[in-house]
Image: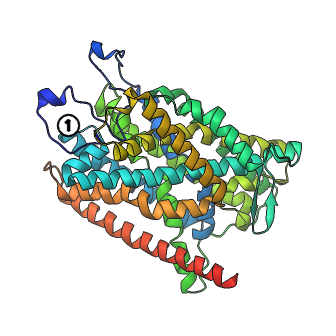
């Protein structure tokens, strides 16, 4: 069975049928005793908040300071808030329709509303988005541990700084070791709630990064060693206006968590808690995003790199600078490692549902589970070696799959209104979301394409 086959069976069948998609737990929430599984009594509010927050605050936070550099502080912060509000609205659309139709997955909802091709479109979008995001995670880990080169300048990684450049701490070897020793064990869990403790730790590590960055920036501000950041973008022609739109996909990608909302909802003991859980997570993540973007841009100014972690390889102009550099980079590299299995969870189920739509649940087929897991880790590892910049990966996934998952699909569901719950306000908001998403991301793709052609002409 695929990720939500779009069928509507009777209640006596649906009570026992196995729903298999990108958002439901790999193991049933409650099953009959002869299935051989133990009863799961429901996830807690805090555990759900941490899991959803971990889904949101991934690698996107590292590219947001570069977006603020491009947009200016005031428009940049406003855009972070606007995208957060639109994200809450789009998730609310999905949750209300799903609860009304007693549907337990995003894919099943798309199948019910738009048929088989709707489900397949959702699956493909989640696969593209999550593969792109996980590649970014690997790139960041490689940048932090093994270093990176940007604009002809090499930024040393932690291992390179500690031990010098060797084969064993080169990017391919370090990422291979990370995949085998860290990712492989974490992606072997078969229920999302099993990752609640690693999720809580990952959020704490992200906060450590924010606090240290803010502290350093404030100290340098009082010492008068920080340049005044630009409040608004510098526009010197039509091309500079087009370039502003390239920041939109990065902001969109930073909030994509829709593919795990149903999974978290399904594991709750009280499903009415999902709305306050979403709101709490978005407030927490938006606060982290704004603080990180503002203080990182304040600290590094126009020298802010696409992956701001790479900026933490030089003297910060404060006592014990090298110690703080290492703490920041290690804490966030660890955060990304702990986020990886949360995103991988949805990716594996979507790919399995797309390739084996009629097979039994993947959790009951260890061979298929292992083959898909190993294949995905291999592809992500190889892509992370070949793709040089997180900005490139974010622009592609954010302008394509992410905007479909986060805004266009939810808006289409509410406009179709198969369950008769959409208000006039809902439909106006849905149309607005689709128009803004299509226009802004079309311009972003056009601007990206023009930049690529210009680089080729210069070369």
Question: What coloring was used for the rendering?
Answer: rainbow
173 sits to left or right of 367: right
199 sits to left or right of 42: right
User: Residue drawn at (21%, 45%), measured in percent from left and top?
Assistant: 6
- Answer whether residue 228 is visible to the viewer in this image: no
Whole-percent x, y for residue 195 in the image = 50, 29
Q: Quadrant of residue 358?
A: top left
Q: Nearer the viewer, residue 89 or 230?
A: 89
User: Residue drawn at (43%, 57%), measured in percent from left and top?
Assistant: 402
Whole-percent x, y for residue 304 in the image = 70, 62
Whole-percent x, y for residue 100 in the image = 18, 41
Q: Residues within 10 Å of mark 1 (few under 14, many from 20)?
A: few
130 sits to left or right of 409: right
Residue underneath mark 1: 102
Q: Quadrant of the N terminus?
A: top left
Q: Residue furthest bottom?
A: 237
Whole-percent x, y for residue 207 in the image = 62, 40
- Answer whether residue 196 is visible to the viewer in this image: yes
Location of residue 136 with respect to 188 vertically, above or below: below
Q: Nearer the viewer, residue 347 or 405?
A: 347
* Mark 1 secondary-structure assignment: loop
Q: Residue furthest top?
A: 33
User: Residue drawn at (33%, 63%), measured in percent from left and top?
Assistant: 433
Q: Quadrant of residue 108?
A: top left
User: Residue drawn at (38%, 47%), measured in percent from left and top?
Assistant: 258
Location of residue 67 with respect to 158 vertically, above or below: below
Q: Quadrant of residue 211?
A: top right
Q: Quadrant of the C terminus?
A: bottom right
Location of residue 75 with respect to 459 vertically, above or below: above
């Amino acid at each position: 069975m695929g990720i939500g086959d779009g069928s509507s069976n009777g209640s006596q069948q649906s009570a026992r049928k196995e729903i298999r998609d990108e958002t439901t737990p790999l193991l049933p929430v409650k099953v009959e005793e002869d299935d051989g599984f133990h009863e799961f009594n429901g996830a807690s509010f805090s555990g759900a908040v941490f899991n959803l927050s971990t889904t949101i605050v991934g690698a996107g936070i590292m590219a947001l300071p570069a977006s603020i550099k491009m947009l200016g502080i005031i428009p940049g912060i406003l855009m972070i808030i606007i995208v957060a509000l639109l994200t809450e609205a789009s998730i609310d659309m999905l949750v209300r329709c799903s609860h009304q139709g007693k549907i337990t997955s995003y894919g099943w909802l798309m199948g019910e509303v738009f048929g088989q091709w709707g489900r397949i479109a959702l699956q493909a979008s989640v696969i593209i988005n999550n593969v792109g995001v996980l590649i970014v995670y690997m790139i960041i880990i490689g940048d932090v541990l093994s270093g990176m080169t940007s604009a002809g300048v090499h930024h040393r990684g932690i291992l390179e700084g500690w031990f010098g450049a060797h084969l064993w701490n080169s990017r391919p070897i370090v990422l291979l070791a990370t995949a085998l020793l860290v990712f492989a064990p974490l992606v072997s869990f078969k229920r999302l709630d099993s990752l609640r403790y690693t999720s809580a730790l990952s959020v704490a590590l992200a906060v450590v990064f924010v606090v240290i960055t803010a502290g350093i920036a404030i100290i340098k501000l009082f010492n008068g060693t920080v340049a005044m950041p630009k409040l608004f973008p510098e526009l010197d022609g039509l091309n500079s206006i087009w370039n502003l739109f390239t920041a939109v996909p990065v902001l969109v990608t930073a909030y994509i968590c829709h593919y795990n909302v149903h999974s978290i909802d399904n594991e709750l003991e009280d499903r009415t808690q999902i709305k306050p859980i979403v709101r709490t997570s978005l407030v927490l993540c938006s606060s982290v995003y704004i603080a990180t973007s503002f203080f990182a841009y304040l600290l590094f100014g126009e020298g802010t790199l696409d992956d701001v972690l790479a900026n933490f390889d030089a003297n910060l102009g404060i006592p014990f600078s090298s110690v703080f550099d290492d703490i920041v980079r290690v804490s966030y590299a660890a955060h990304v490692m702990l986020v990886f299995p949360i995103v991988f969870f949805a990716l594996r189920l979507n790919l399995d549902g797309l390739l084996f739509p009629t097979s039994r649940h993947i959790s009951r087929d260890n061979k298929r589970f292992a083959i898909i897991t190993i294949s995905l880790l291999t592809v992500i590892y190889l892509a992370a070696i070949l793709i040089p910049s997180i900005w490139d990966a974010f622009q592609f996934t954010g302008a394509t799959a992410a905007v479909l998952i986060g805004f266009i699909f939810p808006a289409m569901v509410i406009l179709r209104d198969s369950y008769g719950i959409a208000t006039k306000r809902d439909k106006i908001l849905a149309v607005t979301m689709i128009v803004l998403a299509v226009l802004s991301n079309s311009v972003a793709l056009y601007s990206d394409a023009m930049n690529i052609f210009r680089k080729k002409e210069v070369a």
